[in-house]
Each structure stands twice: as structure tokens, then as C-alpha cells.
Image: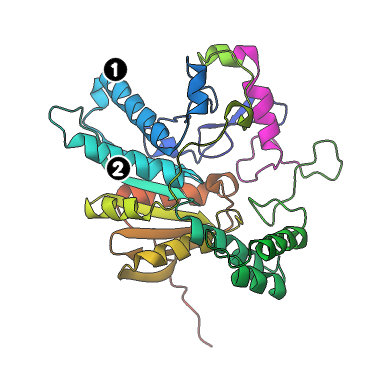
Amino acid sequence: MVELGPFRVNNDGKTLFRNNYAWNNVANIIFVETPAGVGFSYSNTTSDYQRMGDKSTAKDAYKFLINWLERFTQYKPRDLYIAGESYAGHYVPQLAKIILHENKKSNPTLINLKGIAVGNGWIDDPTDYLGQYDYLWTHALNSDETNKGIHTYCHYFNDTDPEQCANFINKSRIERGNIDRYNIYAARCQLNSSSSIKISSESINGFDPCSNHYLLSYLNRADVQTALHAKVSAWDICNRSMYRGWNDKATTILPIIKNLMANGIRIWLYSGDLDSIVPVTSTRYAINKLKLPIKTAWRPWSRDEEVGGYVVEYDGLTFVTVRGADRLVPSYQPARALAMISSFLGGALPPPVPIQNKSRR
């Protein structure tokens, strides 16, 4: 409701306006809140919340898909694409891996998985961390000295001097200042300040940085929860108090991505280029570790005759950037995000930027 869904919440926290660039313009979409405890999802066994991890999340998501398809059998023959962002760099490939594995068993409920798309995805710990700090440095948010110190002392999981590494990480935090790390150029939400940027209602082309607060008010209304057939609960953006640690976490998802490529699954990794937490640099460093041949060289792509971002096609994987987007790509760039995902579903690269005819004198 702040990204790709059909509606967003007005700043009164009570009413909705339509998102004309919702992704369900081009596909049927199931939004799955996972793992249990996220959003309105829950477990009847409270101890489950202390046993969460990558593996249990993937198994639960697969079980959900099977149960859903058995209930709505008319969708069984349909092609399936899985998309997610951020830590879904783990969730999406791991779910795809289980689907491929289970499809090979005798008499399974076959899931016609065709492709996966991951936005600003956390997929490889060493390169993800390094990419964060190189992004800050290349965007003038960290000093040369701090970036050099991080490269010298921080090698993640094999730090040459953990104390010095921690010192430079702290310096990096101080130097960048109090910015929105999801979008380094965005205004921060200031609900009670006259200086806060306010976007008028029903304006999908501008994103209000206070949107999460409006969403919080809306989804905690009793009549909304009843209409959604949700379990009555206190809904929050993050529910960290429910969990007592994460029991298993792969340090890298790259082997799974290689396996998916080998099985012919379409893979797109896309990046909003204003995110500093899982930035475009992190994704590029991770892809480079795969050493893939390039099929289509880096080029700009267009939406409404403007540069919408950049794309490079490798053998088995496509990388796309969305210009002017943050971690939640459809929030600040809904039209470009829809154009990007439409190309993904259509199995074609985003369109090139038209050649401008220059008049001669």
C-alpha cells in the first residue's frame, strides 16, 4: 500500500486513492506476508516465532502456495513469477529452489515457475556490506579516509583488525548524518513540522515520506481489519519484538541463483539507485562474482522517452536499475517500476532510449 498495490492511503489515514501504476495491471498478484508474524500473518503456535529462519520461511511459503493452488485449482496451469525486495534476496531464490525440488517428485502439485525478480536484494554478505560503504563514498557521503579504513580493516568474517573496523564503521555512520538511508536524497518525514513535505492526496506521481504513518493508522482501524478478514491485532511496519533471533541464514545465495539459471529460470535483479542499504553497488559486486558472459551490453532504457534506468543482460541473468528510485522501487518511481516489471514478465529487455533527431543548420 506504499508501493505496487492497487491503492495507497491518503494523509488522513482513513481513505484510499488508486495507484494507476499498480503491478496488477499486468498480472494477477498474490501478496504473501512472510514469515509468520509479519503483517497480519500469524502462527497458532507461539514457539514458532522463536524458530524462524531462512529454511522455515521457504518451507512455509511453499506450503502456502500448494494449499492456495489446491483451493483455487483454476490457477494451477498458470505461469508463476516470484518477486520480492531487500531480504527477499534470500526468500525468493530459496522458495524457487524448493519449488524446483518438489516439482521433481512423483505426483506433486506442479507449480509452473518461470522466473524470479529481486529488487535491491540482499544476496551475498561480503559484497553487500562492501557495496554499502563504496556507495556512500561514491555519493559523497563518506570521506576518502573512512572508505580507505573500511577497505583496509573490514573484510567481513575475516576482519584484519575488528576494533579498527568498528571504529571506521562508526565514522561512516557519523559522516553520512541523519539521512534516509533508503533514499539518500529524500526528505525525512516530520509529521508535526511545518517544514515537512506534504504530497496532495490522489497524487501517485509524488511520494509522501510520511506514507508509512498513514498506512499504520489505516490498517489498525477495526473496520478495515474486519473487511480484510484479518485476525484482529495491532499492526505495525516491523514486529521485531516477536522474534528471538534468526536461526539460520545463508551467507550467500549465489549458489542457488546459479542453480536456478541452470534450470532455465528467468532471473532479474533490479535496483533503485538511491538506496544506500542494499545499493546498486552491492548487487553489481555480487553479480561480478558469478563471472557471467555478457549478452547485451550496458545501455539506458526508456519510459516516456526519458531514461528510466540502465540494463545489462548476462548469460542467464539480467540486471536493471531504476533511475530515481529508492529501496522500495515503486514508491518514488511507480511508472518506471511498472514498465520494468512488464518487460520482465514479457521476457524482453526494457525498451532502449529513442534516438533524438538533431536538426542541422
Q: Which residues are magenta?
A: 198-223
Please report whichever mark, 1 or 2, sits nearer to the chain's N-terminal start: 1
Pointer 1: residues within 10 angstroms few (<14), some, or many (20+)?
few
Visual colour scheme: rainbow
Q: Would you say the residues marked 1 and 2 are in contact, meaning their CB atoms lie under 8 Å apart?
A: no
Report the quarter where the C terminus lies: bottom right
Residue 71: where, in percent of width, then height? 29, 17
Q: Secondary structure at mark 1?
A: helix
Pointer 2: residues within 10 angstroms few (<14), some, or many (20+)?
some
Residue 30: where, in percent of width, then height? 40, 30
Using the image, determine if residue 147 lies above or below residue 195: below
Report whether 164 appears left or right of 17. right
Considering every residue shown, the one lying at the far left of the view is: 106
Report the quarter where the N terminus lies: top right
Q: Name the amino acid, label 2.
A: Lys
Residue for point 48% across, 38% down = 22
Residue for point 86% across, 40% down = 193
Residue 205: where, in percent of width, then height? 61, 45
Residue 326: where, in percent of width, then height? 59, 52
Residue 349 seen from this side: no
Q: Secondary structure at mark 2?
A: helix
Taking the magenta stretch, the answer to whether it contains residue 203 is: yes
Q: Which quadrant of the view contains residue 18? A: top right
Q: Which mark is residue 135?
A: none
Taking the magenta stretch, the answer to whether it contains residue 279 is: no
Residue 11 seen from this side: yes
Q: Identify residue for label 1.
A: 71
Q: Name the amino acid, label 1.
A: Arg
